[in-house]
Amino acid sequence: MRSRILLVAGARPNYMKIAPIYWAIRENPSLPFTVDLVHTGQHYDEAMSGNFFRDLDLPEPSINLGVGSGSHALQTAKVMVAFEGVLLEKRPDIVVVVGDVNSTAACALVTSKMRLDGDARLGRPVLAHVEAGLRSRDRSMPEEVNRVVTDAVSDLLFTTCRDADENLLAEGIAREQIHFVGNPMIDSLRRCLAAAEQSGFLDRLGLDGSPFGLCTLHRPSNVDVPEVLEGLLETLAEIAVDMPLLLPLHPRTRRRIEQFGLEERIADVRRPMGRRPPRGVLGLEPLSYLEMLQALRAAQFVLTDSGGVQEETTALGVPCVTLRANTERPVTILQGTNVLAGLGRREILDGLQAARRKVAQGACIPALWDGRAGERIVAALAQPVGGQ
């Protein structure tokens, strides 16, 4: 008898985490699984979601909840209402949620309370959380609340690093529920690197073989306060005196730059630049996954407030400076190429030098970041889970 699995994705980073699970099932037809991809629509425009399915060799989702944007409360509530209908219709045996976005917490809460047959004796779907146990210890971050809530109600907790295991144990999660499987984002990176090198993105920008830096900014704490965003753009401009600094603009970041009258702080690039790109901070449209991978691999350094980019730069051996006061991925600092700098000009400049030194001294890749996390997750899903 085949078990029905729902793989849930809500926002752009989720796709790199569900893809290796989908691949592992698709490429082993003997596994007793039927899979449905569920896209909540939390990221709902083509630039932020659609091309990721193509880049990651995923089919179009069979279910799209289409929730769109909104406040945290509204978005979470819309996902919960819509996903309850999916559970009642599809009657899955397993629900897999990934990461730390609103969709993750919403679908986890609904699944944890759902009795598909209206009878508590008959159980509910097994709920699995991929990327469990990460902690920033900062409850002002919506993502941190989502992580804690999701882990608390999940049955299977798949971790990317050993410190995540320790976090879960300290919170009272039973050891038998925790599975250290490695990092599925690195599965996607390894599998797609060759295709990324053929994307032609850097050549279209006139940067193939030329030195450049890369920056990503999207967190509300960095882009929603005018003084903070302006200070960051000033520091980026100082760094970009020596070489072009690519800044793919998340829709939220672009809106804030325009709202705060900061357009003159960047060169807004919406078309290929030819063979002689300008210096300075170059604001780009959102990149596809393959374009982003090519840029990450070739960049001299990366400045970011993204958790996933901290992991990808560590896997690629690229100096990374995190523009935040904390991180839920300390393994990228303890073992990898990442330096936590905060938001001050001096701290960022010093952090850039420190990150370069880490790479020169031989930072390492964390355990099980070997491209096989998806296989380990699927193997664990194939084992019976008691007490459901």
Image (cartoon, grey):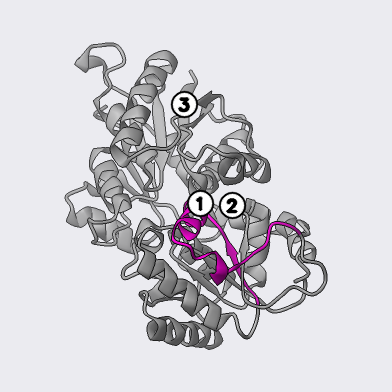
Say which of 253 and 103 sits in front. Answer: 253
Residue placed at 43% from the left, 64% from the top?
305
SS for dot 2: helix
SS for dot 1: helix
Mark toward the start of the polypeptide (2 vs 3): 3
Q: What is the three-letter code of the residue carrying label 2?
A: Ser
- In the image, which disc is placed on residue 65? 3
The relative height of residue 75 versus residue 204 in the rendered view (above or below) is above
Distance from label 2 to label 3 (Cα)?
Answer: 25 Å
Distance from label 1 to label 2 (Cα)?
Answer: 7 Å
Task: Name the residue tied to disc 2.
Answer: 188
Q: Which residues are magenta?
A: 244-271
Task: Name the residue tied to disc 1.
Answer: 184
- Given contact means CB atoms under 8 Å apart, are the residues at marks 1 and 2 in contact? yes
95 displayed left or right of 12: left
Residue neighbourhood size for the residue with mark 2, other residues' Cα within 10 Å, grouped as few (<14), some (14–19), many (≥20):
many
* Residue at the outermost top position: 118
* Residue at the outermost right position: 275
